Image: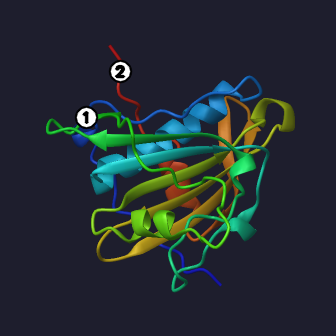
Amino acid sequence: MLDVVTWPAVDDARATPASPRAAPGDDDDGAFLTCVDRIAAAMACRLRPQRVVLVRVLRWFDHRWLRPPGHKVTPPPFTAARIASECHWARRADGAYEVAAGAACLHRPRRRGRDDDDARRLLDAPDAGLFVWYSSGSATDRKGSVITYAVTGRATVPWFAALVPAPHRWRASIVKGLALDDVAELLTHPLPVVA
């Protein structure tokens, strides 16, 4: 059973000037991707991680891919074939985020005799950061899913949310590891204006 974590309230005056954005696919609902962007922006605003990684996973997934607290911190075990895109963002001195070219991948084809040591090292770093996996196909499936790991030197907070369309916006229907009200608040976080 996952513990429920309550996040501190967002101070909108501290909103991140430029936040990471989810990579779109042809079969992704724009409103769902906005939810992913809001989650990343809100958590980046609260945690100020040096690194944010957004991973687009082919097809919807459920909470069984979530690693509960207390287990070894590794990425959800999606095969490399299910990873549509993986984008790494780094925080600049002014607090804004920019794409970090050349970053090591969390998900890549396994080599014989080698496990996910590189990915584990990424997550074990003292300033590991924020990792967000989100499903593709939200326009076709009319549902989407998100797994988030907030990894700091002190703790790892993993949580899952299944999102469904509702009138005027998407909403969380199933949440594991975080309170439903907290996810609802994340989904309303203001997005920075991109110039």
Q: Which residue is mark 1?
A: 96
Residue 179 appears anywhere in the view: no
> In this rendering, which labeled residue sits more in front, label 2 or label 1?
1
Q: Quadrant of residue 71?
A: bottom right
The relative height of residue 21 versus residue 108 in the rendered view (above or below) is: above
Q: Residues within 10 Å of mark 1 (few under 14, many from 20)?
A: some
The relative height of residue 29 versus residue 195 in the rendered view (above or below) is: below
The relative height of residue 81 versus residue 20 in the rendered view (above or below) is: below
Q: CA distance from mark 2 to mark 1?
A: 12 Å
The relative height of residue 66 versus residue 145 in the rendered view (above or below) is: below
Q: Quadrant of residue 65?
A: bottom right
Q: Locate the C terminus and report the quarter of the image it occupies.
A: top left
Left or right of 175 on screen, residue 132: left
Q: Tag 1's secondary structure?
A: loop
Q: Residue 117: give x, y in percent of width and height.
A: 50, 70
Label disc, if present, on residue 137 of the rendered structure: none
Left or right of 188 on screen, residue 81: right
Q: Which residue is mark 2?
A: 193
Q: Residue 161: give x, y in percent of width and height.
A: 65, 57
Q: Locate the N terminus and report the quarter of the image it occupies.
A: bottom right
Residue furthest to the top: 195
User: Residue flagged by tag 2: what amino acid is it?
Assistant: Val
Q: Residue 155: give x, y in percent of width and height.
A: 37, 76
User: Residue flagged by tag 1: what amino acid is it?
Assistant: Ala
Left or right of 26 on screen, residue 49: left
Could you say which is closer to the camera, residue 69 or residue 83?
Answer: 83
Q: Image point 48% across, 48% down: which residue?
A: 186
